[in-house]
Amino acid sequence: MNRVAAEPVSICEAGDSRKVVVDQPFVLQLWEDRTRGEQWVASYDTKGLALLGDDFLRIASNNAVDNGQRIFEFKAVQPGVYRVVFEKRMGWKFTSEDRRIFTIEAQPPAGN
């Protein structure tokens, strides 16, 4: 993943909104505990946003717990306001365990 100029943002740090520039990558991070079977699933408008990467940064520990940061890297492909809805899924459940919603305001590059 290209992390140059992409600053992580979480629901706790920045609330639920983020201003970005079209064609500039941005990162959304969420805690995930894979030991419990958690997995964040993103839903978004693919005409306005593109997913560039989906990575998991495991937190090192001395026990068998498999948790860490789920890192989603996106870029806006056109100006507008978009929602990214993350649902925390468990493999054995039909409904989501948790939901996080980010509002992304994509602005055109400077000078356009």
Image: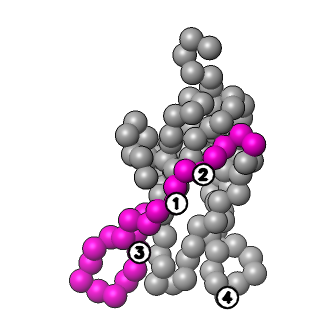
> In terms of sequence position, does the residue under pointer 2 or pointer 4 come before the other?
2
Report the side of 85 relative to 7 (left or right): right
Mark 2: which secondary structure? strand
Pointer 2 with pointer 1, Cβ within 8 A? yes
Q: Residue at x 63, y 31 (%)?
A: 106
Q: Nearer the viewer, mark 4 or mark 1?
A: 1
Instruction: Tell me the number on the disc at residue 67.
Output: 3
Mark 4: which secondary structure? loop
Pointer 3 with pointer 1, Cβ within 8 A? no
Instruction: Tell me the number on the disc at residue 111.
Output: none
Disc 3 crowd, CA 10 A, few/some/many (<14, 14-19, 20+):
some
Instruction: Tell me the number on the disc at residue 54.
Output: 1
Pointer 4 with pointer 3, Cβ within 8 A? no
Circle 2: residue type: Leu
Q: Nearer the viewer, mark 2 or mark 4?
A: 2
Mark 2–mark 1 distance (CA, rounded to whole Å):
8 Å
Q: Nearer the viewer, mark 3 or mark 2?
A: 2
Circle 4 is placed at which residue position? Answer: 92
Specify the quadrant of the image occupied by residue 22.
top right
Is 54 contained in the magenta span? yes
Circle 2 is placed at which residue position? Answer: 51
Where are the magenta residues, as a range? 47-69
Q: Nearer the viewer, mark 3 or mark 1?
A: 1
